[in-house]
Every structure is written in C-alpha cells, then in structure tokens.
Amino acid sequence: MRALVFDGELRVGDAVPVPVPGDAEAMIRVRMAGICGTDLEIVRGYKGFNGILGHEFVGEVVAAPTQTLKGRRVAGEINVGCGACERCRAGARTHCGRRAVLGILNRAGAFAELVTLPAENLHVLPDTVEDRRAVFVEPLAAAFEMLEQVEVHPGVSVAVLGDGRLGNLCAQVMKLAGAAVTVIGHHDRKLALLRRLNITTAMPQESRAAPYDVVVEATGSSSGLDAALSRVRPRGTLILKSTYAGAAPVDLSPAVVNEVTIVGSRCGPFERAITALACRDVDVEPMIDAVYPLELGLEAMKHAASPGAMKVLLRMEP
Amino acid sequence: MRALVFDGELRVGDAVPVPVPGDAEAMIRVRMAGICGTDLEIVRGYKGFNGILGHEFVGEVVAAPTQTLKGRRVAGEINVGCGACERCRAGARTHCGRRAVLGILNRAGAFAELVTLPAENLHVLPDTVEDRRAVFVEPLAAAFEMLEQVEVHPGVSVAVLGDGRLGNLCAQVMKLAGAAVTVIGHHDRKLALLRRLNITTAMPQESRAAPYDVVVEATGSSSGLDAALSRVRPRGTLILKSTYAGAAPVDLSPAVVNEVTIVGSRCGPFERAITALACRDVDVEPMIDAVYPLELGLEAMKHAASPGAMKVLLRMEP
C-alpha cells in the first residue's frame, strides 16, 4: 500500500506492507489524516520513531472483531496498552509502560491507506462531523484533557501561549469552560482566526505583565516555558501541552518561589471532543490551510512545517 | 552591631547599623541562627541580595508594639508583605508582589545581634524547644508546606532526592504523614542519619527504577530535576523544594508524556513545625554539625558549604 514513512528520511512509499491486525483489532481504511506538531518533531528526532507517521485520522472500518463496527466511520485513540499491567487494568492504558502509540512509538501510523487499531480504541462518528473536521477529534481530545486535570471555573483568567494549531484548540476549550482567555502569539493571521471567535489576543510585547490564574504552554518551542512562568500568578497553574525534541535551559526557581503547579497534559477524552465538534462548540474549519493527496505527502509536511501554517490534511484516496 | 554581611564579598562587620523597627514591628535580640542552602546560593549570586544574611533564627523580643511579646523567645516568618494588596488581604503575604524577605530580598537578615520583623510574623516558642532545635522551625515549616499542597495518604510511595538538610526534613515530614519514604542520596554519613530514623535510603545507582507516587526534589542541584522526572510514576507528583542560581538544561517532555504534576513549594506553616519539634515528632539534633560564634561567620559559612556538611549554626552571644 501507499504510505508516508520516516526512516531517517521522509518518503512516500508505494509498496509499504499492509499492517496485520492482531486479536481484537480492527482494520481501518483511512479517509483523511492531519499533520500534527509531533509528526514534525519526529522528523527532527523526537522519540527516535521509524515507520509510517500519523496519528490524527478518520477512516472506515473494513474488518473488525465485532460486527457493530464494520463499515462505520471512526476516529481512533492512539495509545495501545498491553492490557495486562496494573495501569491498563485501572483504565489508564494511555500510561501503560509497554504501550505502543500510533505513528509515534512502535506502531505503524495513519498516513497510509490502511491502519490497524484495537476495536476498543475506535469511536464511531456522527454523520454531522465531516471528515475534514473529524481529523481534529484526536488533538481536540488532547485539549479537553486540560479540563480533566485542572478545575477551570467561569471567570478564571487564562493565557494561552502559542497561536498555532494546539494553542487555538486549547483556547477554544478554555473559553468553552467559561474562562477569560487571552492568546499570546506572534502571527497576526493566526491571531485573527481567534479574534473571529471572540477570543482576546495579544502579541508578546503588548501582553500585560499582570499574572494569569492559568497559563497554557502551547508554543511548541523550548523557550515557551520561561515565558509561561513569567505570566502565571503565584500559586497559579501552568499547563504544559508542548512536546519537542531536546532539552532547553530553564530556570525553575520562579516555580518554587511562586509555588506554581505545573501540569503535564497529553491525550484526552475522545467522546467529549466528538460532542463538541457535533454541537459546533469548537470551530476547526478555518484552521485548515490545505488538503494534499497522500502521494504529495512530502509537500504536505513541508507546508505544515512552514512558519505561517495552521492545519494541513492528507487525503488518502487519489 | 556585629553582623555577617554579603555585599559582593562575605564579611563579618563590627559596626553594622542597627535596623530600625517600623510600625507594628518588633526588635529581636538573636540568640542563634542556622545557615541554609539559600544563604550559600546568595553568595553564588542567587537573587542578587546585598546586606545582612540569614533567615532561620531564634531570638528574644526586646521591643514590641504589644506587651504580650516582650521578653518572649520567638521564631519568625520571613516574608514581610505590603499588607495592602489583594494577596496580603487574602492572607497570602508570602506571595505579596512587593514583599521583602528576611536576609533574601530587601530586608536585613538574622545573622546579626539584632533583627526586626512585624510582630505578626513572630511565633512564641515553648520552653521545651531549645534554641538549637528552634532554629529549625523555619526550614521545617517549609517542609510541612508540602502537606498543605499535596495530599499524602498513608502508604503512598515517596522518593526524596537529596540527603542534605532539606532532604532530611522533607523525608521526616513525609514519614510523619504515613508515606513509605525512600531517600536517595550520595553521602553515606547523611543517609546513615536517616536510617537511624527508620527511613529507607539508597544510593542513586542502587535505587530501583520502579516509579514513585511522589518525588521530592531536594538536591539543591540543577541536575536534580531530570533525575526526579525519571523516578515519578505516570500521573504522579513531583515537588520542587530546591532553589538555585541559574538555568539548567531540562527536558520536560517526560512531564508532558507522563502527565506529571510538578508543584513548586516554598515557605510553610510555623505552628505545625513548632508542634512537631515540641512533640519530638521530628528529630533535628543529629543534623547539627557545629555551632560557631558570629565573629567566626566566614568559617561557619565555609563549613556549611563543604560537601559533607549538614547543619551549621551561629551563636550570637560571644
């Protein structure tokens, strides 16, 4: 099959082996997939992953252990736990020590014609969530994870650092929770997308120094943490959403002196994301910059990595 | 008066001006004071402080706005808030944006014959807590702050990284809360002090990789954070107690991937510390390496900075 592969270099392969579904796994024909910051970081060396990239997708189930899934349009959770360890049995398979992660860790990803996942990872999508928006289920679920971890009361002041894909979704989720949100970013075009949603925006130099109750670090850059620490109030909360390759010099003494709580946040609740998209409580359509066919995967990745880019999608059918 | 001063270089001055108490402030004749890691960091440039060092002390009130304090033996909270801002009015003067901090920020410290503090900062000590142990009230209160911030249930597994002054107190506080504590450190003599309190100890190379529910970073070293992140379980808690001068390269992506909560922790509840000392629930006496008279302050600081040292005290009366 055709797939976008990274094995030290990035290439579109035409004869990539079709993955073999394991017990209790389904085979899904991918319809559309989204390029995420993590995909770009993997190409820069993050996690040392080699194989088919991609973990944000929508597809149609072509084979499944249960009849109810066959032919359905689904999004898929990306963590595949061992199923046997203490964490898996406690329902925390996203933190299984032996997990594989779709297109990130020991498991072929979704930038391909076909992908496999355990049936229990799949979430059937309502028809009202079209393919273009359905690829946002995974990253939007990750944004909703913040609300599982941190109590956000209406009126809480929240700064989101970063106006990209992740920052945009985090800002919309925080607004949905009733927070007074300001997004701080560098790109006027990206900030304009947020202003159209009635979200306050600021350039870094113009944002007030006055501290926020909650700061979300979604810059995807190693310098984001220092900026975030300087904007959170004493005893406030800093949510880390970015991952990137490599270590950066950080002075954490402000976190100690100001008794800041820093919360690492990763994958989140799919059903909450699907509902928000179905109810149009979150607006993702304006974020889509382009849709490329899979055979132009290299151009698509290049586009996604360009400074001004928001979301770039891959379409699997020619 | 005589005082230990840092003004770019460290020196014992014999004619240092006596501080003038402000409104609602008391004058205290210092009896004994303790040298803390923060004092050593200030001499290395932390906070850019210049003036009389010292913030852990016990003394006798010689003048006070209220008669009840006069002649009493006290320990003193080190943060002096403005009293007028929102945070001060909410009782969080330790986080006042305009605060002074005894011997650390804009306020003459306690390595001196006399020191001033607002009367509301003073806590009267029971006679059963002798001077030698009373100097531990401030750092022990900082250790108890962890229990104000993080719920520690009996049986929770806690690793304390660092076998020094701070690590020792943190370990004792965690044990008091019912945690299963392991202290990981490099110094056999310091670890032996903990084993005598029935606290499990390990050298870094021999400590199991299996992750802890809670990890306390009390190494006072910039490399401690990476070590701490590698030892905390997914969705576990990392408490930062160390402050040090300068930034260090840190890879925080494990905190995101494992959804770790990192809690900065600073000053804490004095009354809780006083009770624990009065009840002998915490044992500090074995930590005392030496008591120097104030005029030998330079030797005392040198001793405190030596790798094997635990607590070094200063005695103010000749």
Image (cartoon, coloured by chain):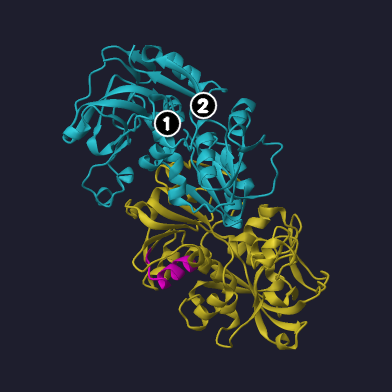
Chain colours: A cyan, B yellow
Callout 2, which amino acid? Met
Residue B223 % position (x, y)? 50, 48
By secondary structure, the bulk of the magenta-drawn segment is best described as helix
**Mark 1 closeness class: few <14, some 14–19, many ≥20 residues within 10 Å:** many
Residue span colored magenta: B168-181
Numbered tag placed on residue A136 in the rendering:
1
| Residue in front for this viewpoint, B193 or B70 | B70
Residue A213 colored in magenta in the image: no
| Residue for point 38% across, 71% down | B178
| Residue in front for this viewpoint, A77 or A199 | A199
Residue B273 % position (x, y)? 54, 75
Q: Earlier in the sequence, mark 1 or mark 2?
A: 1
Residue B136 % position (x, y)? 57, 73
For the N terminus of chain A, the image quarter is top left
Asked whether, in this view, residue B229 is left or right of residue B103, the answer is left
Question: Are circles 1 and 2 on residues that touch, CB within 8 Å?
Answer: yes
In this view, B290 is above or below A68: below
Q: Quadrant of residue A82?
A: top left
* Label 1: which secondary element: loop
**Mark 2 closeness class: few <14, some 14–19, many ≥20 residues within 10 Å:** some
Determine if marks 1 and 2 fall on one subunit: yes
Asked whether, in this view, residue B314 is left or right of residue A31, the answer is right
Residue B286 % position (x, y)? 48, 75
Q: Return the chain for callout 1.
A: A
Look at mark 2 in the image and give the residue it sits on. Answer: A287
Callout 1, which amino acid? Phe
